[in-house]
Image (cartoon, rainbow, N blue to C red):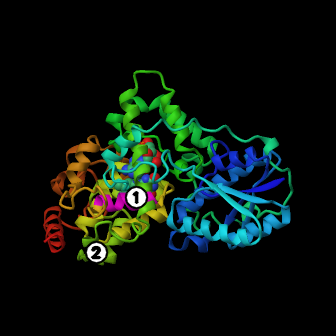
């Protein structure tokens, strides 16, 4: 007998507990995917994520086609599409991975109810995390709100189970069912194609994910603990979009790290702790479904944010006059990615120097990041803005000049993304306005013409931000 496998954010073949459950129940699978943008509402994927999703689905389709069972892609209201497909194929059940995002959980329960009416069972199993929300709690039985004790408690749990092997051809139904052709997916940008060239930067899909992990473990893990804060160093894994779309499971990552030869314990522990942040953010979202929109610390609802659209635009376009901020925003626009250290710097700049609401920055990241992820993005923004669980205190205001000098000391990162000031000597690269006129002229820099003057003065902006914070803190 037949079942549908409803793909969601788990675009892989290995380590899918729900797929394994179906196989163990003697069922043969038809894999499917439903475009249902209305279900996600304001959190339907942004532009960069849609580019990734297109290529990830195409890669999955290729793998499944090799097994005689191409991905059946349909558009419409999920419950109806699945019910129709079940009726068409005689499927007696639908299997899927358990959702974490609030809208996706709601969709899952609607789908379960609607299918039930038609006599079809929905079976969901967790697959996105090492520790499903609720399995690691405080002694009082509450979800953790602070990362360090959370991760310590996770590490005291039994080690996550070995990843499950990939399903093979015999587990799928050979079919030639109607499926939306790739050209009709409507995910890729046209006119202009701002993602032209991204194929050389990224390899969406499970094979690309495995390669990215292997490349990181072979070449970068050793220097991860020291190198991970330096944006020019390429010391991090760049696994975030692969993890977001479920092209690789955190259990696969965990066990690949455990299998390393001894002697790499320190960088391995540091790396797994970052994967732990992902776990932490997801359990926060699970238990606090409002955090993409509302501050975790309610008093931040009173924060007197400004609403300056011109400042927002300058930030989005990488034209704030602060080179490390502009470099990050341009890296984001041109590649769909930004290094974590620089994400913190640009987010601090938006919320503290420009006093713009963190939700505005979150929204821009949502549209432009290939790894845009509801849990990690809302936690990241709330952490920097000071209103999140276990957040940096609001008065910790990054100085973008010192951050630049510390984490991009020889200016490699800034010179790559802000080429119009590349000829400035290192000494002035992170604060061009401090350079004497002669040096600016020699470097071909005319402030206000070839590169913007600083949008705000650091010291003044800092004072204003602290005053604004005073409004809510007492
Ligand atoms: P690595 O350093 O190699 O880390 C390995 C994995 O751990 C990552 O792939 C990611 O899944 C996870 N991870 C690492 N750091 C964090 C973190 N601070 N919080 C949660 N998980 C983490 N990450 C996203 O995946 N999607 C987002 O939309 C996102 N938005 C962010 C917004 C802001 C303002 C900030 C400050 C951070 C945000 N992050 C987000 C977290 C982090 O910047 C990225 O996960 C990281 O830069 C991805 O690069 P990497 O894969 O090379 O990371």
Main secondary-structure element of the magenta-colored stretch: helix
Disc with the residue nearer the chain's start (1 vs 2) = 1
Query: What stretch of residues is rendered in magenta?
Result: 375-384
Residue at the extreme front of the image, as rendered: 140
Q: In the figure, 413 relative to 380: above or below? A: above
Identify the residue under disc 1.
Answer: 284
Residue 163 falls within the magenta-colored stretch: no
Residue 327 visible in the picture: no
Q: In the figure, 123 relative to 88: above or below? A: above
Residue at the extreme top of the image, as rendered: 262
Q: Picture coordinates of residue 6 (x, y %)?
A: 69, 58
Q: In the figure, 120 relative to 1: above or below? A: below
Q: For mark 1, give the secondary structure.
A: helix
Q: Quadrant of residue 466?
A: bottom left
Categorize mark 1 by other alpha carbons within 10 Å: few (<14), some (14-19), many (20+): many
Nearest to viewer (mark 1 / mark 2): 1
Q: CA distance from mark 1 to mark 2?
A: 19 Å
Identify the residue under disc 2.
Answer: 301
Residue at x 34%, y 35% (from the top left corner): 225
């Amino acid at each position: 007998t037949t079942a549908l496998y409803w793909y969601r954010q788990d675009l892989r073949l290995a380590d899918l507990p729900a797929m394994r459950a179906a196989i163990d129940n003697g069922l043969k699978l038809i894999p499917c995917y439903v475009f249902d943008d209305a279900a996600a509402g304001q959190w339907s994927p942004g532009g960069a994520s849609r580019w990734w999703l297109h290529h990830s689905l195409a890669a999955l389709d290729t793998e499944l086609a090799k097994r005689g069972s191409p991905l059946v892609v349909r558009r419409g209201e999920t419950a109806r599409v699945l019910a129709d497909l079940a009726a068409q194929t005689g499927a007696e059940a639908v299997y899927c991975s358990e959702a974490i995002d609030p809208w996706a959980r709601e969709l899952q329960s609607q789908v379960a109810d609607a299918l039930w009416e038609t006599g079809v069972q929905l079976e969901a199993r967790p697959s996105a995390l090492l520790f499903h929300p609720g399995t690691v709690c405080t002694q009082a039985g509450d979800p953790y709100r602070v990362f360090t004790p959370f991760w310590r408690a996770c590490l005291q749990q039994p080690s996550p189970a070995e990843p499950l092997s990939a399903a093979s051809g015999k587990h799928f139904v050979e079919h030639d069912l109607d499926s939306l052709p790739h050209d009709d997916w409507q995910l890729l940008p046209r006119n202009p194609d701002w993602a032209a060239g991204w194929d050389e930067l990224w390899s969406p899909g499970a094979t690309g994910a495995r390669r990215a992990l292997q490349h990181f473990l072979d070449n970068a893990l050793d220097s991860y603990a020291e190198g991970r804060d330096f944006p020019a160093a390429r010391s991090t894994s760049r696994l975030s979009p692969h993890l977001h779309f479920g092209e690789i499971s955190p259990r696969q990552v965990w066990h690949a790290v455990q299998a390393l030869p001894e002697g790499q314990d320190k960088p391995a522990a540091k790396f797994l702790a970052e994967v732990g942040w992902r776990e932490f953010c997801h359990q926060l979202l699970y238990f606090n479904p409002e955090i993409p929109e509302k501050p975790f610390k309610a008093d931040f609802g009173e924060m007197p944010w400004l609403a300056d659209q011109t400042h927002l635009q300058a930030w989005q376009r990488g034209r704030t006059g602060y080179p490390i901020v502009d470099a990050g925003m341009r890296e984001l626009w041109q590649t769909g990615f930004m290094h974590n250290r620089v994400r913190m710097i640009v987010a601090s700049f938006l919320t503290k120097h420009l006093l713009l609401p963190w939700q505005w920055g979150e929204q821009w990241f949502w549209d432009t990041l290939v790894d845009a992820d509801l849990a990690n993005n809302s936690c990241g923004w709330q952490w920097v803005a000071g209103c999140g669980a276990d957040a940096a205190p609001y008065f910790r205001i990054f100085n973008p000049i010192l951050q630049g000098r510390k984490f991009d000391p020889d200016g490699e990162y800034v010179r790559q993304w802000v080429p119009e000031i590349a000829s400035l000597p290192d000494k002035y690269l992170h604060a061009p306005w401090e350079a004497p006129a002669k040096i600016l002229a020699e470097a071909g820099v005319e402030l206000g013409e070839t590169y913007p003057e600083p949008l705000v003065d650091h010291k003044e902006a800092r004072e204003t931000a602290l005053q604004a914070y005073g409004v809510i803190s007492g």
